[in-house]
Amino acid sequence: MNTSPSHYALRETRRYFTETRFVVGLAAVALLLAVSGPFGTHTSMSFAPRLAYWAFTAPLTFALGGYVSAYMSERFRNATPVWLAPLTAAVGTAVSVTLLVVLLNWLAFGLAPTDPAYITGLAFSVFVTAAIIALALHYTSNHASADTADDSATAPPALLQRLELAKRGALVSLAVQDHYVEVITTKGASLLLMRLSDAIKETGRNTGMQVHRSHWVAFAQISNVTREGDKARIALKDGRDIPASRSYIPALKQAGLLPQ
């Protein structure tokens, strides 16, 4: 599977904004910033415009910072020395977020970055804050990845428990067969009387994806993905081809299996 730094960073950034706890937390941060009014916003704006400013600025800066942090972390994940990845994540995030905040303040308040005192104070505050957040994202992301890998290694997908023991190999694909789901593993195929959506829920977290209304494939079993007009075809390691319908092309791109 193509896991380029840009695709990885895009997936991580999107993941943050699809988690309810994160969205609620970000909204709380925006409200807190609107009430406290840091960086001079308390004196230069009334509460309503200040709330609108932070409701726009907080998600935008986090999205940029999260993307840059994830990109740098993945880009230098196996680099030596080991501190190179967190260092580039912190510096890259701090620089990009600082430039974005300076630009937003220029557009919103007309504060051109020409006053040394203003730009120095603002840059220092934003730079340090962004660097700390980037380091936190780097280490929590790595810790979460390690936990997921450990869980995957010790706990097989629940769907396998429905199969006879001799066919409990690694999941390869799922396919709808009338009212049944054909479960194909590296040790054979079985038919289960259940819905495809229910079977997918038992495949485990981030083990694969649905690519057609009748097909699901495991990431680890994909050998190649080719575009065919507005559709795609997925080649599996067992030699079979699985069709990917047009509606799932965006998901394939998001997963890094097709170029953006």
Image (spheres, rainbow, N blue to C red):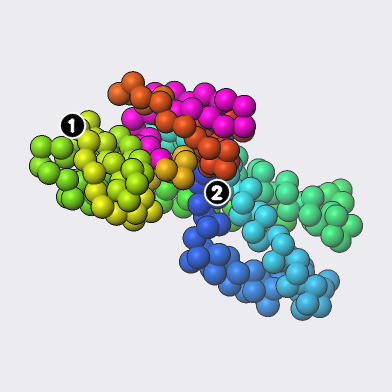
Q: Amino acid at mark 1?
A: Lys
Instruction: Give the residue at mark 1.
Output: 187
Residue 250, given in percent of the width and then of the height, sits at 58, 41
Q: Is residue 129 magenta?
A: no
SS at circle 2: helix
Q: State whether residue 72 appears in this view.
A: no
Q: Which residue does the image show at 58% across and 72% down from the upper left? A: 28
- Please report the bounds of the magenta region as a residue range: 215-234
Instruction: Give the camera-side residue of 16 and 28.
Output: 16
SS at circle 1: loop
Residue 153, given in percent of the width and then of the height, sits at 22, 42
Instruction: Give the camera-side residue of 161 and 116.
Output: 161
Instruction: Give the camera-side residue of 83 and 203.
Output: 203
Q: Is residue 43 above or below residue 77?
A: below
Q: Which of the labelled discs sits on residue 13, or is there none?
A: 2
Q: Quadrant of residue 107?
A: bottom right
| Quadrant in which the N terminus is drawn | top left
Mark positioned earlier in the residue sequence (1 or 2): 2
Q: Amino acid at mark 2?
A: Thr
Q: Which residue does the image show at 42% across and 30% down from the upper left? A: 242
- Alpha carbons under labels 1 and 2: distance apart: 36 Å
The crowd level at tag 1 (other Cα within 10 Å; few <14, some 14-19, many 20+) is: some
Instruction: Give the camera-side residue of 112 and 234.
Output: 234
